[in-house]
C-alpha cells in the first residue's frame, strides 16, 4: 500500500529544497511500489535507470533524453506532462549520487 506524504514530509527527503512544489493541502502518494513509479519516486526511478542503463553518461545526459528513458521504464506509470526541469534535475543528481 502506498504511503501518503505531504509537503512537510517532502522537506525531510529533499524535494522541497529542489524547488518541487507540492501543496500541503493536497497530499499525494509516493508509491514505494516499483511496479507503479511516479515522477517523484526518485529513488525507484534511479535504481531502475541504473539497472537498465549502467553505462550511460549521466553527467552529460540531456533532459530530453533522460525523460525518454524514464518514460520507457517498464515500471513507470505517470503522465509525461507532470514532469518538469526540477524533477529531471533531481533524478540526474540522485543518479550521480547512486554511482558515487
Image (cartoon, helix red, strand yellow):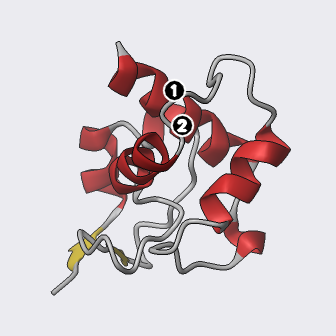
Residue at image mark 1: 93
Residue at image mark 2: 90
- The crowding category of the residue bearing disc 1, from other C-alpha atoms within 10 Å (few below 14, some 14 to 19, many at least 20), is some
Quarter of the image that includes the C terminus: top left
What residue is shown at x 48% (from left), y 34% (from top)? 54
Contact check, label 1 and label 2, Cβ < 8 Å: yes
For the residues labelled 1 and 2, the Cα–Cα distance comes to 5 Å
Residue sitting nearer the eye, 41 or 13: 41
User: Residue 2 location, x and y as percent?
Assistant: 22, 81
Q: How many numbered marks does the figure carry?
A: 2
What residue is shown at x 77% (from left), y 72% (from top)? 81
What residue is shown at x 28% (from left), y 41% (from top)? 13
Task: Answer above or below: position of 99 versus 4.
Answer: above
Residue sitting nearer the eye, 55 or 62: 55
Q: Is residue 17 left or right of residue 88?
A: left
Secondary structure beneath dot 2 equals helix
User: Residue 25 location, x and y as percent?
Assistant: 42, 76
Secondary structure beneath dot 1 equals helix
Residue 82, located in which quarter of the rendered image?
bottom right
Quarter of the image that includes the N terminus: bottom left
Which residue occupies the extreme top position in the image?
100
Amino acid at each position: 500500500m502506498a504511503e501518503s506524504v505531504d509537503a512537510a514530509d517532502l522537506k525531510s527527503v529533499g524535494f522541497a529544497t529542489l524547488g518541487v512544489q507540492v501543496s500541503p493541502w493536497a497530499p499525494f502518494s509516493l508509491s514505494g511500489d516499483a511496479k507503479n513509479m511516479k515522477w517523484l519516486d526518485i529513488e525507484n526511478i534511479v535504481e531502475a535507470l541504473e539497472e537498465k542503463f549502467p553505462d550511460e553518461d549521466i553527467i552529460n545526459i540531456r533532459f530530453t533524453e533522460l525523460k525518454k528513458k524514464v518514460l520507457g521504464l517498464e515500471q513507470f506509470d505517470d503522465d509525461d506532462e507532470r514532469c518538469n526541469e526540477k524533477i529531471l534535475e533531481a533524478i540526474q543528481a540522485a543518479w550521480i549520487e547512486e554511482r558515487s
